Image: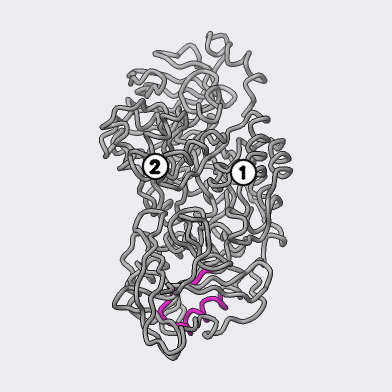
Amino acid sequence: MQAWNECAARLVDVAAGRASADTLIRNGRWVNVHSGEILPGTDFAIVCGRFAAVGPDLSRTVGDNTRIVEAEGRYVLPGLCDAHMHVESGMVTVTEFARAVIPHGTTSLFIDPHEIGNVLGLDGVRLMHDEAMALPINVFVQMPSCVPSAPGLENAGASIGIADVAEAMTWPNIIGLGEMMNFPGVAAADATMLGEIAATQQAGKTVGGHYASPDLGAPFQAYVAGGPADDHEGTRAEDAIARVRQGMRAMLRLGSAWYDVAEQIKAVTESGLDPRNFILCTDDSHSGTLVNDGHMNRVVRHAIAQGVKPITAIQMATLNTAQHFGLERELGSLTPGRRADAVITSDLPSLPVELVMSRGEVVAEHGGISVDLPVFTYPSTARNTVNLGRDVVPTDFDTAAPAGADQVPVRVIGVIENQAPTRALEATVPVVEGCIAGDATQDICHIALVERHRGTGKVQNALVSGFGYNVDCAVASTVAHDCHHLLVVGTNKADMAQAANRLAEVGGGVIVVAGGEEVALVELPIAGLMSDERSDVVAAKAQQLVQAMADCGCTLNNAYMQHSLLALVVIPELRLSDQGLVDVREFAPVDLVISA
């Protein structure tokens, strides 16, 4: 696809009828996201990957070599945009993520590769940046802002600072700064955080936000003053309202396990706020969701089901996103000069994706991808990143109880289904052979974090509730947002050790061990985060993983996603880092045992 200035004369000539279009979409119902109208009997003339003209009867643009795509009265809408997401959560590479989402109508992704940044630093971000540029859809990269996400409370495999951000702003495919997760740092005028934001704004690019506190008073106002332009961490209608009132865009997410659209969209459907400042996104979707359930088409359908007008929901996944990132002249609508990214569908509320075009080429039809994707090979430096330093043994998961106690009061991480936050619970659990034990009757099991970047052999232990495991089992993952140490949850310490050691052996991944048997494994050899297999293969393995967790008694929706966030020390309330248990409400370490 050519830049606009390189083909402006051809666009004008085609629109005027002096030259022939490369492609003509004929007789569609134009979903016009600028005017909010649906206009029947519309043709769309395309040349050099861009729309040249849109209107009734563009037969003047047809030549001997013009390809005709018959819309046959179906709806034609802009290609869908995911405004904030992490490719690594799909457990696949950028290329394979694109393979999974293109048939669902997604033609633009705004990715924040802070997962690989936490493992490999700036070099890892550059790898994903370069891979993204070769794809036939638009994949823009946000430079990670917080690596590690909470300095002083965790240690990542790498670090990113102001100089790194400034360098990345010169790369051709960087669209802005990724989610600014250190919201206490911004609110406290931390020099590094404000320096990264300043470097981004000086480059004329967009600063992503991440304010994960329910406090909408002075700390929130201080955070907004620090420069973030959007936020996807809201879970309540008042969160969305507060963000929009302060000049931010409210990003409403529906991922594999984050169901935050239904409550927040009430800001539009019930409170009547202007929908132009609301954007839909996914944040985190694993490969099983992508292949089997959909991507942004799933989010748009969900928003419509909450009472949003179809064209408004489509605006929230197209034009609103493009405007937010300063790309309105490139993306987000079916209008002259824009990239010819389009979806043809026979129904808006249910949004079956029947044909997808990107940059004027048909890239998917009837659920199947119809374009070859380039091969991108990750180097050896991106592999073999799981370094435990030694074999893990069952006694690594022992936590000594106070002398003489037969039970002890403890803090427990409480999982909240379909949300990223956790609860800071308290419970009394038994002591077994001098060690603090889990308690199946209270749905409390062990959780441990094994340091995996520097081979220190360090293990931190705590307790977690909400998974429902009722057999001897363990679930381990080297995907542990955001520092991505090895995180293992289980009811049996031997299974926990087996699971951890197996992941070290395969170079990273996610595993379920039950009764000493390996029952599910997704190998993720690239940075311990991504597979090098096809997206459909990874999706099948991910489905086996979900089933194995269910067989162990777990009833949570997409429990793996809940598992992977238990070390995320920038979202309240209670998390486990390589430094120990952290109360994110206070951003301070706390003891497992509650003192009298």
Could you tell me if residue 511 is visible in this image?
A: no
Q: Quadrant of the C terminus?
A: bottom left
Question: Which residue: 54% across, 33% down?
Answer: 225
Left or right of 165? Residue 210 is: left
- Mark 2 residue type: His
Q: Quadrant of the N terminus?
A: top right
Q: Nearer the viewer, mark 2 or mark 1?
A: 1
**Element on which disc 1 rests:** helix
Question: Which residue: 61% across, 70% down?
Answer: 451
Question: Which residue: 46% across, 83% down?
Answer: 401
Disc 2 + disc 1, Cβ < 8 Å = no
Here the colouring is: one colour
Question: Which residue: 37% across, 62% down?
Answer: 415
x and y, in percent, of residue 89 in the image? 50, 55
Q: Tell me: residue 462, above or below residue 538.
A: below
x and y, in percent, of residue 44 in the image? 45, 20
Q: Nearer the viewer, residue 135 or 156?
A: 156
Could you tell me if residue 562 is visible in this image?
A: yes
Q: Tell me: residue 354, above or below residue 454.
A: above
Q: Nearer the viewer, residue 229 or 58?
A: 229
Does the magenta portion include 498? yes
x and y, in percent, of residue 329 in the image? 55, 22
Q: Residue tagged by mark 1?
A: 132
> On residue 366, which mark appears?
2
Give, as a single range, the part of the protein colored magenta: 487-502
- Mark 1 residue type: Ala
